[in-house]
Amino acid sequence: MSDEILRYTDLAAAIQLAKSAGMTAREIVRELTRGMTYQETLKFAKRAAPLLDLNVVEFMRLRKNE
């Protein structure tokens, strides 16, 4: 998914587009938060996690490289 699509698309639409492309929740979280600091990601997670049917803790856990 290109950065241009995410820049001009609302968050719910971007997540729906990623899901329809077959991306997993982990892939979506990592793509959306790429280059963000921990604090930026935490703030972002409060908006994005419910759209992925996750809570903030699960969202942040998916972001980790494990």
Image (cartoon, rainbow, N blue to C red):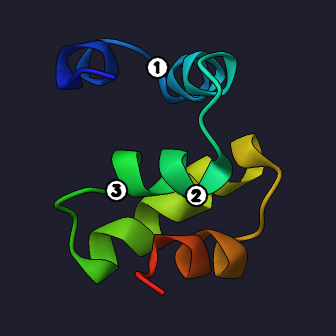
Q: Residue 42 falls in which quadrant of the image?
A: bottom left
| Residue at which label 3 appears | 33
Assign a secondary structure to mark 3: loop
- Give the residue type that dot 3 points to: Thr
Q: Residue furthest right?
A: 53
Identify the mark at residue 10; answer none if there is no mark: 1
Q: Are marks 3 and 1 in contact (CB under 8 Å)?
A: no
Position of 58 relative to 19 (above/below)? below
**Residue at image coords 37%, 68%:** 41
- Residue 9 location in percent, x, y? 39, 14
- Residue 43 location in percent, x, y? 43, 67
Which image quarter holds the N terminus? top left
| Residue at which label 2 appears | 26
Q: Are marks 1 and 2 in contact (CB under 8 Å)?
A: no
Q: Residue 30 falls in which quadrant of the image?
A: bottom left
Q: Is residue 20 left or right of residue 44?
A: right
Give the mark nearest the N terminus, 3 or 1.
Answer: 1
Query: 47 or 18: which is nearer to us?
Result: 18
Q: Residue furthest bottom?
A: 66
Q: Is residue 49 left or right of residue 53?
A: left
CA separation, marks 2 and 3? 11 Å
Identify the mark at residue 39; answer none if there is no mark: none
Tell me the mark number nearer the camera, choosing from 2 and 3: 2
